[in-house]
Image (tube, rainbow, N blue to C red):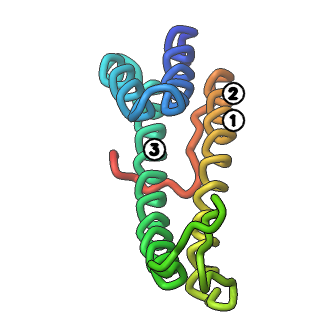
Amino acid sequence: METKSEINTATFIHLSSLLQYCIPFGNYIFPILIWTSKKETSEFVNHNGKQVLNFQLSLLLYSLLLAMIAIPIFIVTIFNNVPFNAVIHDNDFVINNLNLENVTGVLVVGITAVILFISLKIIEFFLIIFASIKTSNGEKYNYPLTIPFIK
């Protein structure tokens, strides 16, 4: 049976991944620091630390894949639709030949990738909160769609 200290530490590991919204790479740095300091003394903390890091690394991989799809599509679409003969008339910036007739299936794929990325970040937030609640109740939580990088 886990002690209250182990449960609190494991819960804090989950919650520390929310620091990504305040500190760049906080979702990796703080869980790693907490997990490595307590992983040898508690199997419960070790399990939860691995889960948090595997989940964050999986989300990084998914985000990179979505970015590799969306960014080139948007760059190509912008350069195809924006002519370099944009002019300024009466303090208004006018771009000639910019229309939505050239919206293709490829652009729809790019928009879908952006929507998936936004959905992924929203789901991540709620899964972290859910995992923290489960862990604070003494349960071992496994994140869905997680690649086991750390075993």
Image spot of residue 34 (x, y percent): 38, 20
Q: Taking 130 as reference, is 118 above or below it? A: below
Q: Taking 26 as reference, is 142 above or below it? A: below
Identify the secondary structure beneath mark 3: helix
Q: CA distance from mark 3 to mark 2?
A: 18 Å
Contact, CB < 8 Å: mark 2 with mark 1?
yes
Q: Which amino acid, by three-letter code, is at mark 3?
A: Gln
Q: Which mark is first along the chain, 1 or 3?
A: 3
Count of marks overlaid on the render: 3
Residue at the spot x=41%, y=33% of the render?
A: 24
Q: Which one is in front, 89 or 122?
A: 89
Q: Which one is in front, 65 or 10?
A: 65
Q: Which amino acid, by three-letter code, is at mark 1?
A: Phe
Q: Is residue 101 left or right of residue 75?
A: right
Label 1, on which residue? Answer: 130
Examine the image and state in which quarter residue 37 appears: top left
Q: Is residue 99 left or right of residue 86?
A: right
The image quadrant where one finds the N terminus is top right
Residue at the spot x=58%, y=58% of the render?
A: 117
Identify the secondary structure beneath mark 2: helix
Q: CA distance from mark 3 to mark 1?
A: 15 Å
Label 2, on which residue? Answer: 133
Contact, CB < 8 Å: mark 3 with mark 2?
no
Q: Taking 72 as reference, is 129 above or below it? A: above
For marks 3 and 1, give the one nearer the viewer: 3
Identify the secondary structure beneath mark 1: helix
Q: Is residue 58 left or right of residue 112?
A: left
